[in-house]
Amino acid sequence: MTRLALAAFAAGLLFSTGAMAATETFHATMTGAQQVPPVTTSAHGTATVTIDTATGKATWTVTYTGTEPFAAHIHGPAPAGKNAGVLVPMKVGPSPFSGSATLTPKEIKIIEEGDAYVNLHTTAHKAGEMRGQLTK
């Protein structure tokens, strides 16, 4: 009976560890100073993106204050200080807003390598009012 209980515990640990290993979480603190070129604004925000690398499903929550964005995206590939095209469109809404998308392995790699950023676009700053690089 003791061996059976130990085997069941070990199997449970193995399965729970495997499930955790497939999830990665990335964060961004967004400011106008990180825009390229920088933008003077009191608006700021945060983004959290969680990726299930086994399925490619990404989920996010974005919180902001001091502005009213009409669009939001994950852009890449680009390091901090460089601009890039839209990698993943986000449906923007009142703060906080959330959403999800299925990413390709290439898109996941760009985010994992730190070459992606979240950008909120506003009427006053169509190219983006605030930006933050996604990091683990």
Image: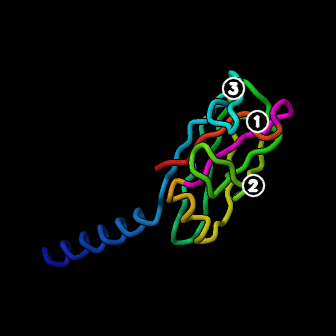
- Residue 22 vertical placement versus 1 (above, below): above
Residue at image coords 74%, 45%: 72
Q: Quadrant of residue 107?
A: bottom right
Q: Amino acid at mark 2?
A: Pro
- Residue 29 vertical placement versus 75 (above, below): above
Observer-nearest of 80 and 74: 80
In magenta stretch: residue 123 = yes
Identify residue for label 2.
89
Identify residue for label 1.
94
Q: Amino acid at mark 1?
A: Pro
Find residue 43 and report its horizontal and vertical position in percent. 69, 26
User: CA separation, marks 1 and 3?
Assistant: 14 Å
Which mark is in front, 1 or 2?
Answer: 2
Relative to 100, 52 lies left or right: left
Q: Secondary structure at mark 1?
A: loop
Observer-nearest of 66 and 75: 75
Quadrant containing the N terminus in the rendered view = bottom left
Q: What numbered label is drawn on residue 43?
A: 3
